[in-house]
Image (cartoon, rainbow, N blue to C red):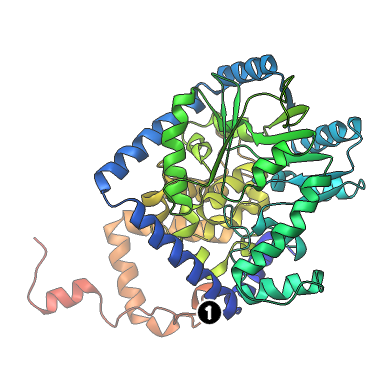
Amino acid sequence: MNQARAFHHRIDKALHDDQLRRNFRSALSGIQAKREIQFPDDTQLQALREQARAVRASALIHQPELLERLEANLTANGIQVHWAEDPEQANAIIYGILEAAKARSVVKGKSMVSEETGLNQYLEERDIEVIESDLGEFIIQLAHEPPSHIVAPAIHKNRREVAELFHRFYPDIPYTEDIDQLTQSARLILREKFAGADAGISGVNFAVAETGTLCLVENEGNGRLSTTAPRLHIAITGVEKVVEKLSDVPPLLEILTKSATGQPITTYFNMISKPRQPGELDGPEAVHLVLLDNGRSRIRIDAELLDTLRCIRCGTCINYCPVYVQLGGHAYGTVYPGPIGIALEPQRLGLDQVGTLTSACTMCGACAEVCPVKIPLPTLINRLRAEAVNLQRTSTPLAGRGSLRKPGEASIWKIWQRLYSSPGLYRLFSFAATRMRWLTPVSLGGWTRYRSAPRPAARTLHELARQEGFRHE
């Protein structure tokens, strides 16, 4: 099945799942309402967005030297730094660290980059137990599903579905649909895992070059337990997460939490700079950081597409996307769904692999209006649409350029361009189209699946104007 057909199949499946769509509508409406409360003053919001944009843009411009400073300061602090070009290399590095430490069980904090590399499956195939400790990630791990949202991975499930899932895997726990009791049950299950785990793996929200500090933002405390309870902590993140100074973090943290969940601040903000020091009673004995490129350096080369890397993974663009709310994250078939996924994944994986994602956008502009770091997502998506059908050679290293070009469609647009650039030809075409309107086809491919085929009027606009006495001067 080619990418377009597979994408359309997933879309059709999502559109026929009424419960799924109700789940998304209910959850996203609540998140939007909470966000609006956090930003009552639009002037202050726009000032904060501009500050956050400037911080991220500056970090990307100076990324090479910031990464060098980050590595130097982390190393000086006792944290071991590893560089990975692609997912295979990142997974192999992490597995090597675990093997050297004789670690056979891992508790894992939330990490979209580890989803990007397929880390869980990689480790499980090598007989290392991996337990997701974030509640949402724990739920979808039980369901053997990927995340449906980058912040709320189980947003597509309601309380009844979660209750049935818990009852199936833990029949000794009394069945309940009460959210607080379900959360308490998960807490009891996971606490045993934290206590017995050989290693913890986490993501990173911001990596501070100035101080060699890894910052983790979370609400449940599972990130803090994953990074401190086991004797070994491995963090993995994309190279774009680096920021220059510790003072750059507060504006990013403020707009991240308010945008992502509608909270003034998250419950926990973790700052990790060193492994356990002599005399300290807790913390890991060793800390490792894996910095993953996976196409990010290639994206950074293009002055326009570079803006994609400003993303702080808040999910706000997803929350306001009218397409996402109808389809959910799984319909996209990629790690990152929604507008940011449409912009990032074709660059990361290639237009020939997931270029059809660019069609899942109405160009309404809602994502750009709410993005906390002002990524011009519609502009980037439109650029990728053009690149997908562009056969001309350019300096932009986009894999799969021109792979979605259809010769017949391209010929039609060339004819259309010629007609519109010549007044005489346009008038002739308009006259012929009105007189032979009965030849208009009833089916126009996907367009007429949900719409009636347009038919030319019986008379052209110029004819109607002349009939009313208007004359062209």
Q: From what the image shows, is residue 38 above or below residue 307?
A: below
Residue 150 appears anywhere in the view: yes
> What residue did someone put label 1 on?
449
Residue 57 appears anywhere in the view: no
Which residue is depicted at the point 82% across and 44% down? 197
Which residue is depicted at the point 56% across and 61% down? 408
Secondary structure of the residue carrying tag 1 is helix
Q: From what the image shows, is residue 57 above or below residue 336?
A: above
Q: Point out residue 171 in the picture as x, y percentages from the top left corner.
A: 81, 74
- Relative depth, front residue between 256 and 399: 256
Q: From what the image shows, is residue 343 above or below residue 1?
A: above
Q: Relative to 387, is 251 on the left or the right?
A: left
Q: Point out residue 433 in the picture as x, y percentages from the top left corner.
A: 36, 75
Q: From what the image shows, is residue 456 above or below residue 297?
A: below
Q: Residues within 10 Å of mark 1 (few under 14, many from 20)?
A: few
Number of callouts = 1
Q: Looking at the rendering, which quadrant does residue 75 occupy? A: top right
Q: Point out residue 179 in the picture as x, y percentages from the top left corner.
A: 60, 69
- Relative depth, front residue between 384 and 392: 384
Residue type at numbered disc 1: Arg
- Relative depth, front residue between 386 and 49: 49
Q: Relative to 64, is 280 on the left or the right?
A: right
Q: Relative to 175, is 385 on the left or the right?
A: left
Task: Give the quadrant of the C terminus.
Answer: bottom left
Task: Give the quadrant of the N terminus.
Answer: bottom right
Which residue is depicted at the point 55% across and 23% down? 63
- Relative depth, front residue between 53 and 379: 53
